[in-house]
Image (cartoon, rainbow, N blue to C red):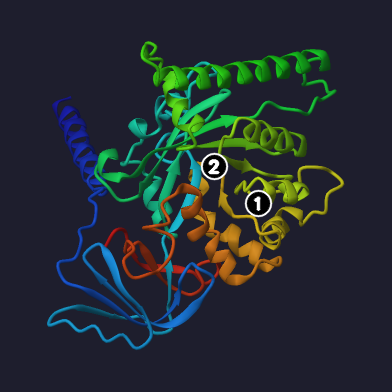
Amino acid sequence: MKKLYYIIFLTSYVYILWLGNLSAQYVPAPGKVSKLPTILTGGTLHLGNGLAVQGDLVIDGKKIVAVGPDQTITYKQAISIDISGKHVYPGFITLASTLGLEETEQANATRDDRETGTVNPSVRALVAYNTDSHIIPTIRCNGVLLAQIAPAGGLFSGTSSVVQLDAWNYEDAVIKRDDGVYMNWPSMEFYQAWWAPPVAEQKKSAERKMKTLEEFIEDAKAYAKAKKSATPPANNPSLEAMVPVIEGKRKLFIRANGEKQIIAAAAFTAKHSIKMVLVGGFESYLQTDLLKSYKIPVVLTRTHRLPLREDDPVDLPFRIPSILEAAGITFAFETEDHWNERNLSYQAGTARAYGLDPESAVKSLTSYPAQILGIDHLYGTLEAGKSATLIVTEGDALDMMSSTVEHAFIDG
């Protein structure tokens, strides 16, 4: 019996040591800015502005200091990396993501992507962002270095922020704090099916949501005006979060897919002088003139999918980016599923195969999302003076068969 107890004790001890060693394998230590300048020589530089050139790229501290052929900058000491035959891209940017807000969809304890209730613009994604998410390294390894993290659910989901994906905590990660407010446009499609409520009930639900939306925006406008008066009102967190939206300092990201939703959302935001970004946009190709006239950019959701309607061409989702590009509409991609962000670049690659200009496909992952987020003064293109946030790949970064990210720099 003593021998049995000894075997059980020894086995348990070894098991605990093994668990400790296993847990020690994941140490999320952010990289450090090099003390020496870094020179990448001889690669193909995809600038993110629609051009690609052969040449060198020089990083000093957190910034790019030179880009292109025939660089004359010299240093007494520098790190030189030969990237001949390889490609350099600005770091890819994903939008409308719940990355770091949810880990496992089936485990509620790991989900901070939504709040109870329907009107929650004051809910801030940033303070719930988990920099230790095990999903983040899988995203970085495919070149996604920046993310707009956004809440989901309800009518007004909450306020998003932009982060870089290599930091100890959300304070270190944040690039742009509270950049926009997310909302879900009420459904304007009514279904007659066994799984759906009666059509009359669906219509009443949509009407209630529209009434709530109208009243809330009017309240926010009145609140913003009252704040400037001699007797400002008591602080209201929900209305306070909408003041920058009402004043045009913060964008309203509206999730909508159907044509009727898109038309209604565009008319609503124009009526209230609100800057809108369309998220989803399954039928955005049907309203290109409207989107262009109102200067509404589009964040396309999950283009690796079947069409929205049964009689649509099966390859339509792959062709929508080229349709938007031809119409002069700024657009970017998102995957909808946080665990699937690693495949972001391949959506652009598929769009390229279906008519999108190759360097425009790069723009849709870099400079276009940077413009939508208002961070294009620092990110999105390879230019002197901008952040050294970039990747070096063996093979085409938009081709899953040939792409391997060999180096990644975030702010140097």
Across and down, in percent, residue 205 comes to: 71, 15
Across and down, in percent, residue 36 comes to: 16, 71
Across and down, in percent, residue 78 comes to: 18, 78
Task: Determine crowd level at label 1: few under 14, some 14-19, many 20+ residues with C-alpha closer than 10 A.
Answer: many
Residue 233 vertical position relative to residue 392 in the rendered view, above or below:
above
Closest to the observer: 271 or 146? 271
Question: At label 2, which amino acid type do we have?
Answer: Asp
Across and down, in percent, residue 364 comes to: 55, 59
Residue at x-position 54% and y-position 42%: 337
| Quadrant location of the C terminus in the rendered image | bottom left
Closest to the observer: 216 or 13? 216
Closest to the observer: 34 or 215? 215
Residue position for label 1: 303
Among numbered discs 1 and 2, the one appearing first in the sequence: 1
Which disc is residue 337 wearing?
A: 2
Q: Specify the quadrant of the image occupied by residue 66.
A: bottom left
Question: At label 1, which amino acid type do we have?
Answer: Thr
| Quadrant location of the N terminus in the rendered image | top left
Task: Determine crowd level at label 2: few under 14, some 14-19, many 20+ residues with C-alpha closer than 10 A.
Answer: some
What is the secondary structure assignment of the residue under circle 2?
A: loop
